[in-house]
Amino acid sequence: MQVNQWWMEEEPQTVETPRNVLRWYPGAGKLQLSRPDRDGSVGKTVTLDVGIVRKSGQGANARAILQAVMDALEA
């Protein structure tokens, strides 16, 4: 079984802060949020698979949550 290594095939759009790293892989449709370890290496990471959310029928709900996050970023 061949594993799709999308994180190695695409350069993400990245936002880094001292406590968070946000990576968007538009080609793969994956959004990652990581918390760096104390030594600066990538620590705990969660990945949102946008396609799976859409196929689940929860796209509108996810969009509402992400819109609330975007609104909070502008405040």
Image: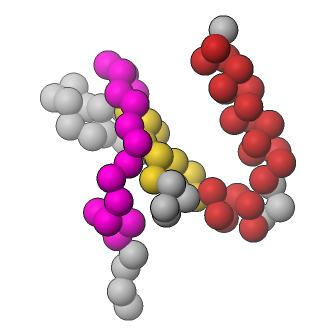
Quick check: 20 above or below 54?
above
Answer whether residue 47 is visible to the viewer in this image.
Answer: no
- x then y, percent, for residue 63: 76, 42
* Quarter of the image with the C terminus in it: top right
What's the magenta region? 5-20
Can residue 39 be seen in this snapshot? Answer: yes
Question: Which residue is pictured at 64% across the width and 14% down the height?
Answer: 74
Asked whether, in this view, residue 25 is left or right of residue 3, the answer is right
Instruction: Farthest residue to the left: give it.
Output: 39
Q: Residue at x 65, y 64 (%)?
A: 51
Q: Is residue 57 left or right of residue 33?
A: right
Q: Tell me: residue 34, above or below residue 47.
A: above
Residue in the foreground of this view, choosing between 38 and 49: 49
Q: Quadrant of residue 39?
A: top left
* Residue 43, image quadrant: top left
Residue furthest to the bottom? 1
Q: Nearer the viewer, residue 29 or 52?
A: 29
Q: Is residue 25 left or right of residue 73?
A: left
Q: Where is residue 9 shown, x and y percent of the image?
A: 32, 65
Residue 12 part of the magenta-drawn span: yes
Q: Position of residue 64 (x, y in %)?
A: 80, 37
Q: Position of residue 41 (x, y in %)?
A: 20, 37
Q: Nearer the viewer, residue 47 or 54?
A: 54
Residue 43 falls inside the magenta stretch: no
Quadrant in which the N terminus appears:
bottom left
